[in-house]
Amino acid sequence: MNNFLELASSRRSIRKFEDTIVPAEDVEYFIKAAVNAPSGCNSQCWRFVAIRDRDIMERIEEAVIKKLEQILEFNKKELTESYLASKRKMVSFFAKAPLVIAVFMTNANYYDKVLIASLKEQGYDDEGIMKLLGNFDILSVGAAIQNMLLAIHEKGYGACWMNDPAIAGLEINEILGIPPEQKFISLIPVGVPAYTPKSKKMKEMSEVFSII
Ligand SMILES: Cc1cc2nc3c(=O)[nH]c(=O)nc-3n(C[C@H](O)[C@H](O)[C@H](O)COP(=O)(O)O)c2cc1C
């Protein structure tokens, strides 16, 4: 890779992996890339759990599929067996990766206590304050995940940012022994890619960018 744009533009989501183990020093490299991301008020409001244990992956897979089936129960008339089979696969392919990184969001800090006190006086709760301030906690976690995806790609591995498993977020916290206040955000399966992804359709630059 000659430059950053080449690294960023050649990264793709990978959903099928070789069995090759990802060594601990590579995992640490990915996490170091993640924790160097910017975060609102330097909160570093993230937590990562790297899972290589197959039993734990299977327990998470079961929890996600169970939750999916519970959700779909309410639209039984449109539920075909082939839809269900493909949906099950779509939400649980992470469990076949040699490594899965679970990402959680921890409490953010606020630099400006005067501003926060004023908002509380006006009846804002913690969630309302964070929403008003542009949800910088979740944005910070997203920045960390993207740093991590690029580091994974740089090392020749593939990964996929997966939010679908969030349907079973609380169950994932429980399986991994993470307290519920640390909100589950995403799973990132990682491994040596088992295929080359097709090229993807990109929007025109003029559609997404202007300079004035
Ligand atoms: C916040 C976020 C959540 C995503 N969740 C999922 C997911 O649950 N399952 C999945 O297969 N892909 C998921 N993706 C991957 C996107 O589908 C993928 O990034 C997009 O199609 C563009 O393809 P590319 O990553 O190969 O460039 C997610 C991506 C982002 C940024």
Image (cartoon, grey):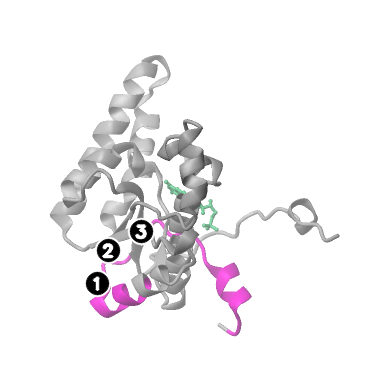
Q: Mark 1 belongs to which amino acid?
A: Ile
Give the answer, above or below, for where 179 lies relative to 200: above
Q: Mark 2 belongs to which amino acid?
A: Leu
Q: Quadrant of residue 206?
A: bottom right
Q: Earlier in the sequence, mark 1 or mark 2?
A: 1
Within-10-Å neighbours for mark 2: few <14, some 14–19, many 20+: many
Q: Residue at x 51, y 32 (%)?
A: 122
Name the residue carrying label 1: 21
Q: Answer yes or no: disc 2 within 8 Å of ligand 1.
A: no
Q: Nearer the viewer, residue 43 or 202?
A: 43
Q: Quadrant of residue 51?
A: bottom left
Viewer-nearest of labels 2 and 3? 3
Q: Is residue 5 magenta?
A: yes
Question: In the displayed image of the protein, which residue is found farthest to the right?
Answer: 212
Where residue 176 appears, as percent x and y from the top left, is 18, 51
Quadrant, the C terminus: bottom right
Disc 1, SS:
loop
Q: Residue at x 35, y 51 (%)?
A: 107
Disc 3, SS:
strand
Cα–Cα span, label 1 and label 2 = 8 Å
Give the answer, above or below, for where 130 lies relative to 30: above
Task: Say which mark, if any, is on residue 46.
Answer: 3
Where residue 142 appears, as percent x and y from the top left, is 47, 56
Name the residue carrying label 2: 99
Viewer-nearest of labels 1 and 2? 2
Left or right, 6 with respect to 38, comes to: right
Where residue 19 appears, as percent x and y from the top left, is 26, 67
Q: Which residues are magenta?
A: 2-30
Disc 2, SS:
strand
